[in-house]
Image: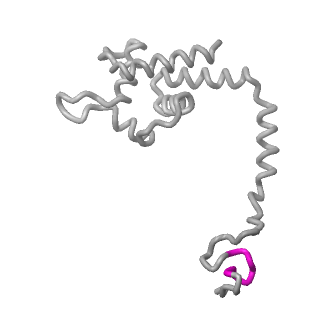
């Protein structure tokens, strides 16, 4: 084990006696693959046009409207940001009411609305806050299309 020097750093001078980095520590070597990743990312950005991205996003929207939970999750996370709730598993668990007389969770309400719009099932009205979020999502989708 490195014993501290009279100046309070270990003999190699990189750490304090408490194990923290000492002043003047040059740091680590960084990410050895960082340059390669940057070059590959640049190649990908050159290869994908705005029209390509628009087509991919429209396909994602189509899949989400079709009820694909992963597409819904990705679309909502990328347009509105990460939800405060847990991962997609929580959304799937939230699809059904907990017991008799209880209403389904928020995700179930949104999915029910999507299914009703496709003519698959009757739907109860969304709460005002969910209706507002739904309207915002639809507005953003339309903006992406134009």
Instruction: Name which residue lies at 39% across and 36% down.
Output: 91
Instruction: Name which residue lies at 81% across and 51% down.
Output: 35
Which image quarter: residue 4? bottom right
Residue 129 in the figure: left or right of residue 99:
right
Does 136 appear above or below 33? above
Q: Is residue 76 magenta?
A: no
Q: Where is the C terminus found, in terms of image quarters? A: top right
| Residue 79 placement (x, y as % from top left) | 55, 28
Q: Where is the N terminus found, in terms of image quarters? A: bottom right
Residue 87 in the figure: left or right of residue 25:
left
Does 126 appear above or below 30? above
Which residue range is magenta in the image? 8-15
Does 38 appear above or below 4? above
Asked if one can make out residue 70 in the rendered structure from this viewpoint, the answer is yes
| Residue 54 placement (x, y as % from top left) | 67, 21
| Residue 97 placement (x, y as % from top left) | 26, 32
Most foreground residue, 54 or 31:
31
């Amino acid at each position: 084990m490195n014993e501290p020097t009279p100046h309070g750093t270990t003999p190699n001078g990189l750490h304090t006696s408490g194990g923290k980095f000492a002043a003047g520590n040059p740091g680590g070597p960084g990410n050895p693959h960082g340059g390669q990743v940057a070059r590959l990312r640049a190649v990908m950005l050159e290869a994908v046009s705005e029209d390509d991205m628009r087509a991919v996003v429209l396909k994602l929207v189509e899949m989400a409207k079709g009820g694909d939970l992963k597409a819904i999750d990705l679309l909502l996370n990328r347009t509105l940001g990460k939800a405060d709730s847990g991962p997609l598993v929580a959304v799937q668990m939230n699809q059904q009411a907990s017991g008799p007389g209880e209403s389904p969770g928020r995700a179930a309400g949104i999915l029910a609305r999507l299914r009703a719009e496709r003519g698959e099932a009757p739907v109860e009205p969304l709460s005002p806050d969910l209706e507002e979020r739904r309207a915002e999502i639809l507005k953003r989708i339309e903006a992406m299309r134009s």
